[in-house]
Amino acid sequence: MVENLVIIGSGPAGYTAAIYAGRAQLKPLVFEGFSAGGIPGGQLMTTTEVENYPGFPEGVHGPKLMQQMRQQALRWGAVLIADDAIAVDFTQYPFAIASADLLEVKARAMIICTGATAKRLHLPGEEKFWNNGISACAICDGANPLFENADIAVVGGGDSAVEEALYLTKYARRVHLLVRSDHLRADKTMQERVFHHTQIHIHWHSSPINVDGDEVLRSVQIRDTQTGAVSDLTVGGLFYAIGHTPNTQLFQDQLELDEAGYIKTQGKSTATNIPGIWAAGDVQDCVYRQAITAAGTGCMAALEAERWLSTDAIASGEGNAIAC
Ligand SMILES: Cc1cc2nc3c(=O)[nH]c(=O)nc-3n(C[C@H](O)[C@H](O)[C@H](O)COP(=O)(O)OP(=O)(O)OC[C@H]3O[C@@H](n4cnc5c(N)ncnc54)[C@H](O)[C@@H]3O)c2cc1C
């Protein structure tokens, strides 16, 4: 039995691709995941309120939003399997996928939506204050009333850290940028903006080692990486900006990836380097990393796959992208 379309991943990208492919009567098979690269439903399952997804003026609980996307995919005939893909072979056609529960599936077309994982520091008190003061996304959580006029710490020294620090000055009284070394790795222009920003204070040679608070985060303990001295910084928020790991382990020798491990897509499309395979969401996006952009590219991938499957593109070996 060969499936028309197999989708790997069940975040906003995977479910949106499933909704569009289901409506196109492709009866997509979705490996929703189980424990590899997150949980079924993806990153939004680990948050509380999502305030920037269009259509929800009062905000929506992350898990509820994902449950609704899942219901919508089921309504349009997607077949959902709560299982991890553990091996793929894109050198053969139809493509082959094997799952942790020993399922072996062949597919005419595939959409990869395995997302990315925000790196965490795994500080002793981190779990308690995750979503209650600790976050890994300033755009997602910066406007939370918890951070209004508060002192906020941002950890990191690269482009993301600098961008997050600048972004958070809209809400915070003061942003403390905690940098492990004596220099920033960010783009020079952005560095200049940070150096001259009156609300940003840079702490060189500083690494967080613990967090404390009551119901919400109240302080972060910092170690001086040169002297070993430990001090407390009173903050209402702590943002990790230490990078993301794209969930592409499985595709390492199969698809073209960039230096950071993200799947490379071509031009304005979600096409990968292999005809018949598309990638959508955070797994191919190190820039925007939002639910709406993941859903948007999931839609693109499904439309591209549907168009590709319904022409004789397979026989002619034509690429994945669709023209205007
Ligand atoms: C705490 C937090 C809060 C956030 N808040 C917001 C917000 O308010 N607004 C916003 O727009 N964005 C927010 N984001 C970002 C948003 O969640 C992501 O941009 C979005 O979820 C990316 O969607 P995705 O479909 O690409 O991947 P993900 O959501 O990462 O989902 C990936 C999926 O792939 C599955 N998977 C991985 N490997 C395998 C495998 N081998 N086999 C099968 N399945 C696999 C996982 O189980 C998961 O279902 C937040 C992120 C975090 C971490």
Image (cartoon, grey):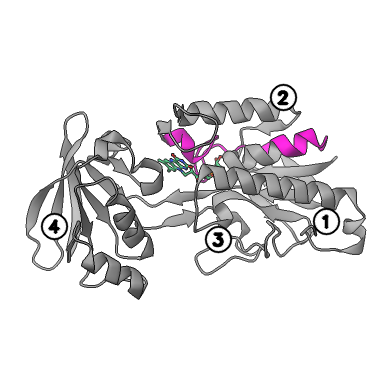
Considering the numbered disc 1 on the image, is that residue within a helix, a strand or a loop? loop
Q: Are marks 3 and 4 in contact (CB under 8 Å)?
A: no
Q: Quadrant of the N terminus?
A: top right
Left or right? Give the position of 244 relative to 180: right
Query: Amino acid under label 1?
Result: Tyr
**Residue marked by disc 1:** 93
Q: CA distance from mark 1 to mark 2?
A: 29 Å
Tell me how far mark 4 sits from mark 1, CA to CA: 54 Å
Give me the C-alpha separation between circle 1 and circle 3: 23 Å
Q: CA distance from mark 3 to mark 4?
A: 33 Å
Residue at (53%, 35%) from the top-left corner?
Answer: 54
Q: Crowding at label 4, few (<14), some or many (≥20) Cα neighbours within 10 Å?
A: some
Query: Mark 2 or mark 1, which is nearer the start of the sequence?
Result: 2
Q: Where 187 falls versus 272 (above or below)? A: below
Q: Residues within 10 Å of mark 1 (few under 14, many from 20)?
A: few
Element at label 2: helix
Quadrant assignment, res 93: bottom right
Residue occupying image coordinates x 70% and y 54%: 278
Tag 3: residue type? Tyr
Residue 7 higher or lower than 69, as above or below: below
| Residue annotated with mark 2 | 75
Per the image, the residue denoted by label 4 is 223
Which residue matches tag 3? Answer: 262
Pair 1/2: label in front: 2
Which residues make up the magenta segment? 19-46
Q: Amino acid at mark 4?
A: Arg
